[in-house]
Amino acid sequence: MQRSRLIVVLALMLIGGSAFRGLLGAQSTTPKAKLPDRPGDATYTPTKLEWAALELQASYGNTNYTSESPVTIQWVALGDGNTLLCILQYTPDVPAGVVKLNREGQQYAFDKYKAARGWSWLRLQFDEHILSGKSR
């Protein structure tokens, strides 16, 4: 009696499982409504260089210029396919030591990023701009 009950339960589980998978399969083949053709919806796959610029900017970039953080830092992918540009911007009253510390910090972050991914092809170029005016 116990054995026949176990067989019935297993049979129901198998039948139920295949019926459930059938429902899921039916859903996935149903066509979705077509979205309007808008430029922002176009599929785009970033390059490794673009991803590197994005990740470094998100992790180490600084776009807010304040007296506490007087050096702005932007990471940009150059058009050669293997170079990132790190742009440092600061006013003339920012001490050279602060600029040097920021540059060295960005170089260190870049080196760690490059090593972690094994991307020996990746290069870094710095560009520094002295802005007019004083720090806020």
Image (cartoon, grey):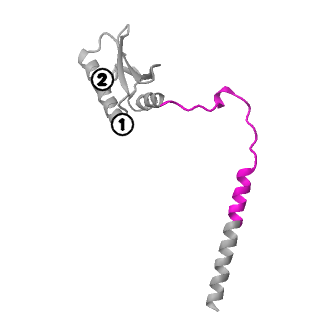
Q: Position of residue 75 (x, y in %)?
A: 42, 23
SS label for mark 2? helix
**Number of other residues with Cα within 10 Å of mark 1, as a class: few under 14, some 14 to 19, many 20 or more:** few
Amino acid type of the residue tagged 2 in the rendering? Asn
Location of the N terminus (image quadrant): bottom right
Which circle marks residue 118 in the picture? 1
Q: Residue at image x 23%, y 18%?
A: 97
Let me know if residue 103 appears in the view: yes
Region rendered in magenta:
19-47
Amino acid type of the residue tagged 1 in the rendering? Gly
Q: Is residue 85 left or right of residue 15?
A: left
**Magenta includes 20?**
yes
Residue holding disc 2:
102
**Magenta includes 111?**
no
Residue positioned most to the bottom = 1
Let me know if residue 66 appears in the view: no
**Number of other residues with Cα within 10 Å of mark 2, as a class: few under 14, some 14 to 19, many 20 or more:** some
